[in-house]
Image (tube, rainbow, N blue to C red):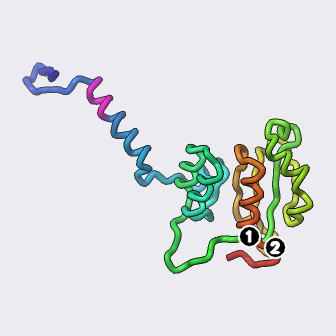
Amino acid sequence: MLRSEPSGRQMIPHSAALRCLLVLSLAGAILGLGERLGAKECEDLGFTGLALCSDCNTLGEYVKDKELVSDCRKCCSEDSDDSLSKVTFSGAILEVCMRKLMFYPEVAAFIEEEKDEFSYVKFKYAYASPPKLIMLDSEGNEKETIRIDNWKREHIQQFLKEKVKPGVSVS
């Protein structure tokens, strides 16, 4: 229902305008219409611009956290058509706070039971650090940081098998 102002113009009630704005905002969020995050926001979420958008799709297959995958897509770099190879790394550091480790049983199980199979992964305990993988290049420099709070042990294994090629330079 339209109201009239004292000047005689028709106005849409505020609640209808707010509902319309809310619907448009939700549609944009659902469709992911071009929302990109800055480098600082991505780093705070545990992503860097080195992740390819196709990697976010792979992440979505392993981790059923839609918000995490959405954040990944907001921070990823578009895949280039001329590059058929995926980004790989020469090593990794799994960093976590020793006091918080009990809240992440899948990460704890990976550390306890898989450390021999993944000899190229170093373990670092840092106070108040959430569980994350720090991906390394052939010189041991940090290239990408990925939060793994909600990952299952088999997802960590699969990710490392696909992304870490010991002794190979970063592609």
Would residue 117 be found to the left or right of residue 171 on screen?
right
Q: Residue at x 83, y 38 (%)?
A: 100
Left or right: 115, with 136 as reference point: right
The residues bearing labels 2 and 1 have C-alpha atoms spaced at a distance of 7 Å
> Quarter-wise, where is residue 67 in the image?
top right
Q: Residue 167's x, y, as percent?
A: 82, 77
| Image spot of residue 52 (x, y percent) | 58, 64
Residue 79 is situated, as x and y percent measured from the top left of the image, at 53, 69
- The residue drawn where x is 87% and y is 51% is 111
Q: Which residue is mark 1?
A: 89
Query: Would you say the magenta stretch is mainly helix, strand or loop?
Result: helix
- Magenta residues, start to end: 15-20
| Residue occupying image coordinates x 39% and y 45% | 28
Viewer-nearest residue: 108 or 5: 108
Q: Residues within 10 Å of mark 1 (few under 14, many from 20)?
A: many
Disc 1 residue type (three-letter): Phe
Q: Which residue is mark 2?
A: 166
Residue 60 is inside the magenta segment: no
Q: Nearer the viewer, residue 75 or 56?
A: 56
Q: Secondary structure at mark 1?
A: loop
Q: Quadrant of the C terminus?
A: bottom right
Secondary structure under the numbered disc 2 in the rendered image: loop
The quadrant of the rendering that contains the N terminus is top left
Residue type at mark 2 is: Pro
